Image: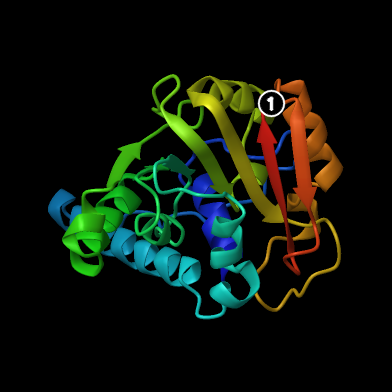
């Protein structure tokens, strides 16, 4: 299982980030506490389970074939010259895009709602990126309704494999629109509502949003110029919009 689990991570954490009108899937339940276990023992068991969960999450985000079908270089190229830009990566996951962007953009603000992924990302930044690139990334713990971006702070806001799981998509887009600097743009990359391989762990069709719906919701949120590309990637569309 690859991206199916990672997008369900947000549901598992109880954040309420689900596509508008989409049915809520049943979530795995934690084992009941053992009757004779001490509080310390239960705490240790919970910590071990959380570590195992995080390892699976990261493994899914970092699937070896992800670079082949998601083509991060192509997606980043479509954003234009980033040398003097601040890019906000909303729902960064394991930092698949953030780590790449830090080597190109002037600044990257990586936003997640899971504190464990914030900790993981901070560790990865220190271990994997050269010091000049480390200084370009800032992680922020957001909420399902608040990106924790300042008004006008970001030149580009990127949502990859995230949009379909927002609870109030139009409302959140309106929130993000305020965070864009003049001339800024939002970039949405998500799965097409068509037949795609199921053996790679991609979301079921019921959890994918048709391209025209994304376009309509962007316009409803006040984005006047919406340009879509559903040809460059086999399984996903790329939508770039400006207010």
Q: Quadrant of residue 198?
A: bottom right
Say if 69 sits above or below 113 in the image. Answer: below
Q: Nearer the viewer, residue 60 or 242?
A: 242
Q: Is residue 19 visible?
A: yes
Q: Nearer the viewer, residue 200 or 70?
A: 70
For residue 48, side relative to residue 55 (left or right): left
Q: Residue at x 25, y 68 (%)?
A: 128
Label 1, on which residue?
170
Residue 15, given in percent of the width and then of the height, sits at: 50, 37
Q: Quadrant of the C terminus?
A: top right
Q: Is residue 47 visible?
A: no
In what element is the residue under mark 1? helix
Q: Residue at x 46, y 58 (%)?
A: 97
Q: Residue at x 73, y 30 (%)?
A: 218
For residue 134, side relative to residue 192 (left or right): left
Say if 242 sits above or below 115 in the image. Answer: above
Q: Nearer the viewer, residue 38 or 44?
A: 44
Q: Quadrant of the N terminus?
A: bottom right
Residue 6, given in percent of the width and then of the height, sits at: 52, 59
Q: Quadrant of residue 130?
A: bottom left
Say if 83 sits above or below 36 in the image. Answer: above
Residue 121, given in percent of the width and then of the height, sits at: 30, 56
Q: Nearer the viewer, residue 47 or 103?
A: 103
Residue 197, given in percent of the width and then of the height, sits at: 76, 75
């Amino acid at each position: 299982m690859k991206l199916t689990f990672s997008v369900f991570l947000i549901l598992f954490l109880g954040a309420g980030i689900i596509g508008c009108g989409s049915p809520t899937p049943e979530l795995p339940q934690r084992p009941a506490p053992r009757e004779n276990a001490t509080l310390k023992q239960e705490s240790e068991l919970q910590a071990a389970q959380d570590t195992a969960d995080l390892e699976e999450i990261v493994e899914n985000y970092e699937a070896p074939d992800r670079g082949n079908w998601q083509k991060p270089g192509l997606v980043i190229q479509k954003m234009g010259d980033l040398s003097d830009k601040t890019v906000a990566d909303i729902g960064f996951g394991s930092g698949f895009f953030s780590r790449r962007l830090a080597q190109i953009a002037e600044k990257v603000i990586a936003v997640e709602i899971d504190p464990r992924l914030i900790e993981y990302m901070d560790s990865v930044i220190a271990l994997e990126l050269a010091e000049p690139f480390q200084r370009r990334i800032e992680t922020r713990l957001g909420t399902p309704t608040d990106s924790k971006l300042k008004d006008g702070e970001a030149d580009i806001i990127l949502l990859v494999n995230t949009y379909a799981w927002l609870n109030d998509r139009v409302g959140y887009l309106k929130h993000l629109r305020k965070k864009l600097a003049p001339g800024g743009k939002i970039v949405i990359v998500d799965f097409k509502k068509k037949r795609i391989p199921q053996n790679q762990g991609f979301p079921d069709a019921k959890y994918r949003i048709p391209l025209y719906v994304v376009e309509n919701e962007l316009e409803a949120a006040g984005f006047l110029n919406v340009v879509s590309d559903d040809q460059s990637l086999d399984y996903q569309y790329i939508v770039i919009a400006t207010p």
